[in-house]
Image (cartoon, rainbow, N blue to C red):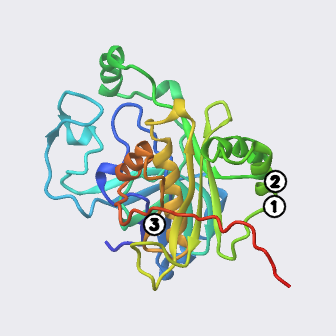
Amino acid sequence: MQPIGFVRSPYSDKREIPKGPGAKHEALGILEIRPEFELGLTDIEGFSHLFVIWLFDRADGFDLIGRPPTDDREHGVFATRSPRRPNPIGLTVVQLQRRDGALLHVKGVDMLDGTPILDIKPYLSSIPADQLRRGWMVDAERRRRPATVAAPIAFIVRSAMGSDREQVAHMRALLWPSASVEEHRRELEAGSVSHLPTETFVAVGEDGGLVGFVEVGLRSHADGCDAAKPVGFLEGWFVNEECRRRGVGGALVRAAELWAREQGCVEMASDTWIDHEESQKAHAALGFEVVDRCVHFRKSLGKTTIRE
């Protein structure tokens, strides 16, 4: 077998991939199909979801019995999704958002960046829901339920639309309170003044309301980054307080990182206030490292008297 393409994913480390009870796979990604197989994508746009068959290329060896992250009991490898399999093949269902030539833009990736793709098939199921059995997972969920403090928040991440402007303006005012909601609204209506590409992603909660946003753009350079290449930059990043530490911020940043990769960037940069410890911890949790600290100064020159 030979790969028909590779996955472009926001995940570079398996520890970044959501696992365990209630894990949601909402990450955006790209299935990059090799040019010689592009013709095989003909008519794929008509399907909403796809099976992706892929290779656990970084797995080492196998275990016939193991303990999955969704349970505290051991199960056979063929009754789990463990990567440590005799034949290290993975299966994921993704939502197809759009096709761009040999690139399939999808949602729901749970693979590492660069994962080889073995095959793609349309997702079709004729089995009624009442005939499906979920095996040991039902019992595992029942045993874990009493220890559950709060259900994970349900949300999706997508590009911002014009109808989001009012909610984004209110969140911007919380992030940057030096300007009013109306001033932020006018700035959003005017659009970006940068000559470089920009994008805004929003997190949409279960009730349809926005719970966070991230603004990302390209900069010609950023401190600590390669000055010869443009850099993806987090211009603004905000999550409603009640939704923090529940995966929303990380999902927004991953969407921004994927967008930056699509622009040809190999580095991501950001900044925050020197006394904003919560923001610094959030950046560190997502893999950012401190490259510089800066103190800004100002001096009033007073009124200038012009002599004749």
Question: Which residue position holds label 1?
Answer: 190
Q: Residues within 10 Å of mark 2 (few under 14, many from 20)?
A: few
- Tell me the kind of residue under disc 1: Ala
> Toward the viewer: 121 or 18?
18
Q: To which quarter of the image does residue 99 belong?
A: bottom right
Are discs 2 and 1 less than 8 Å apart at CB?
yes
Residue at disc 3, secondary structure: strand
List x then y, in percent, for residue 220: 55, 79
Question: Which residue position holds label 2?
Answer: 186
- Tell me the kind of residue under disc 2: Arg
Residue positioned 48% across, 73% down in the render: 222
175 to 301, vertically: above or below: above
225 to 285, vertically: above or below: below
4 to 285, vertically: above or below: below
> Toward the viewer: 300 or 308?
308
Residue positioned 34% across, 13% down in the render: 146
Which disc, if any, is residue 268?
3
List x then y, in percent, for residue 217: 59, 67
Of the 4 image quadrants, the one containing the N terminus is bottom left
Label count reads 3
List x then y, in percent, for residue 252: 53, 50
